Image (tube, grey):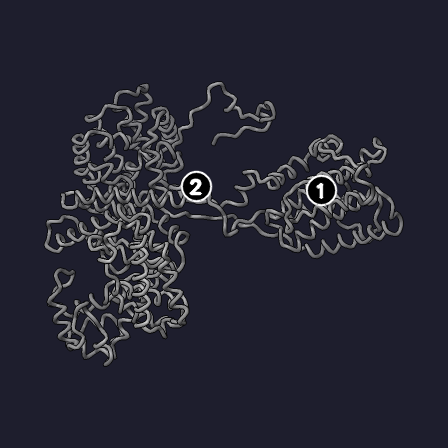
Amino acid sequence: MLKHSSLKDHKFVKGKFMTPLNSLDQPLDEISWFHDRLPEYVWIGLIIKKFGRTLGLNYCGRISNLLKTINTDMNAIRFSNILALDAEKQKHFWHEVVALIGTEVIAPLTAIFTHSEHPVFAEIFCSKLDDYDQRAEKIRLVLHDASDHQTYFATDIRFVVLYSALLSGKLFVEQEMGELILKYPLLSHKNEEMRLTRPTVRSMEATANKTNNEEYLNCFWEAISKMTDCNLFCLPFEKCSDDSDIYMNHVRRIMDYYAELFASTSPLDKKMLVLLGMTTYSYKCLLELVNHDLYNAILGRIVIRILIEGYIMMKHLLKNESSHTDIWSDYQCYGIGQYKLIAKRGEETERKDALSHVLYEYLGFLVNETKDEELINMDTKYFDNQGIREKAIAVGEKELFGLYYDYDSAFAHGLWGAIRESALLKCDEASHHYHCVPDIEDKQKLASVWHDCKMVMDKTLGVLYDVYGLPQQYTTGVSDG
Amino acid sequence: MADLMHTKIKELEFNYLSVLKKAESNIYSANAVAIIDEILVFWERNRRLVECILRHDIIPYDTYIFAAATYMDMNDYEHYPFVTLGKKHIMDDRLCSYIKIINGDCDSNDYSKKLHNLLLTVIQDNIKIIENCFPSILILPVRFLADIEKDAIHKGTEVAFLNMFTSINSMKEFFRLKDIIEIEKALLPTIPNSLIFSADEDMSNSFISRFREYQKTIDYSMVSKDDETGLFFTAIYGYFSQALDIIMLCASYALIPYIRYDVAFKYMLSLSSNFTDDEKIRLIVFRACIAFSLYRIYDTHDFCNIEFSKYVEAVIKYDFSGKLLSDINERNFFLSNASVEEVHEMIEKHLALLKLSIDNA
């Protein structure tokens, strides 16, 4: 299997990591086996499925030889090309095919190619019909088994395509390679020689198939997608939160200690207020995670993102304390300034919604709580002119940002990766292109955030521990920051 | 305003029209199988859209389905009374069910030829419905495609059928009965007089003589005329199955069955008595009774001169359904206590007022 490019292999250009393939001057054509070629050869797959590999390939070979007398195009064996033959030629061809293999084998395709668009085909193959569901199931099975371009079944089909292309005389190969290819139907897949022959067949077939018939493909896939029901599945995830009660009690005791310490020793200390305030905010988020069973929920990822950002910010404030006159007041002002901006917008809007969760008037009170709002600016940039990534690197937490925060940010912003992971269910149906459907019934949960939440909460408490210490009885489980 | 559902419904109906027209011109050709198979394939492909329409586009208990009929009969203006009650209307397309019976060559036997004739009539009627009645009436193969428990219906029908007999406990035992006389002996005493074979039979005649009259009318059937047990089964089991199917279908999707055929209506009413505890089914059956009464009273000559779309507009403007149901509710009528005469009077009154509103417009 082709090895994927590493991060280093990508070219970073104007904020984008470009893959080596996408960096080429000539973009690659994307003609996929499953989407763009297999639909043309489902009929071959049906023959091989019905008669088995040996006899099936034999029949396909005879049919290819027959086709050569009618159409010398290299892609004559494509179903769309056969359906496009004039009526007489098509009738002659199908009658010969029926004489060889009967009508039942290819008849399932009448569920897609009906009389109004393809009268010749439909008239010949509609004589003895399976139920619609049975026809759909036979097609579905071929699509499913041949969806991976490297399976034996898919390779057998590709061999027939290649053989037909060679017969047309328009595809040239070296003698040695030609001999190798012609041995293909005679050798079992277990034969060692096939380890070379199969890749040869596949690469040559791909070379011979550079174009596709969009109209045919659209018609095919539209019909196919309506034939079958979704086969949905979801990934199971455990909560992994057996120790949540014990852990939360432990954190609660520590928080109690710091709260009491603050109130009794330094009730006016801004630094302590800010650090404790930030830790309490993280603690409350964690409490909500536990109380509302959000371990495997989308909101669980928002919680851990908050914890990480809070922790990084605490470390940043401590690290840069000496370069500010009063970084703690600055930080509070920055946050309150954000509130002021919102409160001002609320004041000035004509639109008043009594049921809104944003209490603009109350925000106004909070803004004016410690000083008059006329003394509070509204800074719309990052605090200290540094984004969270730069802050994380500066405080030695690049990994925490790169491996966790960035991932959780996708959930906070509702980016497609997060949507795909949490809000969509995968369909295991080849005829539906293995698509995804909305998870309205909330079946798909996510991997538990509990372990990582504890890790970050411990780091956060570790910051307080470093600054204010902690009696020994509380120190179990608190890591160094 | 964009409405994907209604765009898709229109596409569906007119694509079906195209399929029907091709089928119409080729039904007797040697390619008949391929052509009518296309109708089956068309609906199977659109199964999910039909289910989506049934789940999301109908108005619960105010959408009427033209059921227990092979075709509507546009030539007889049957579409006029049908659209008089209710906000949405669906013609249950039976083509797919009949198509499954077709074996192929239309010249093979007389029965098959007659079936082809019937198919042609239905196809032509369906074409007229789409061309003249869309969007007021949709054609959908509801009973054919609906996602309801077919096994449960078969079981229920068998139970209802066998419950008519004193000591016949299985279908195998039933088919051991040789003729209609043995059947009558095996039935519970009250049953023979409640069974109906056809619409115009004289109920004062005996069970056996009514069956004999019915036997004479059988034009074509999968069963031989001389096989009395088979004929009895086909008739009665068929009616039971149809009635139960209609009840379950309408209960699943909150539809009201519009049944104009006497016999089918009576069996539906009779079998619905097994669901007296179900409030929703009682409501459905009550409204079905009102619709049946409307059908019996309605004189198409009063309205058939009005262009259909204008008639629909007039019905909506007058709010025939709303006014009639309001009058019925004011009298506190339900399935158990409604006076048939009074309901008939209300229907007549509102039909007269509707006509007046149209004449004065």
Q: x, y (%) of residue A296?
A: 59, 49
Could you tell me which secondary element the residue under label 2 belongs to? Answer: loop
Q: Crowdedness of circle 2 by 10 Å Cα count: few (<14), some, many (20+)?
A: few
CB under 8 Å between discs 2 and 1 = no
Three-letter code, disc 1:
Ala
Return the residue nearer the eye: A243 or A223.
A223
Q: Is residue A213 left or right of residue A275?
A: left
Return the residue nearer the eye: A83 or B263.
B263
Answer above or below: position of B78 versus A118: below
Q: x, y (%) of residue A240?
A: 62, 52
Q: Quadrant of residue A49?
A: top left
Q: x, y (%) of residue A342?
A: 70, 40
Res B2 label:
2
Q: Crowdedness of circle 1 by 10 Å Cα count: few (<14), some, many (20+)?
A: many
Res A343 label:
1
State the residue lying farthest toward the right. A265
Three-letter code, disc 2:
Ala
Asked whether residue B317 is in view, the answer is yes
Asked whether residue B97 is in view, the answer is no
Q: x, y (%) of residue A21?
A: 50, 24
Q: Chain of mark 2?
A: B
Name the residue rendered at 22%, 25% in the picture.
Answer: A71
Could you tell me which secondary element the residue under label 1 belongs to? Answer: helix
Q: Quadrant of residue A459?
A: top right
Question: Quarter of the image containing the C terminus of chain A?
Answer: top right
The alpha-carbon separation of the residues under discs 2 and 1 comes to 37 Å
Return the residue nearer the eye: B156 or B336.
B336
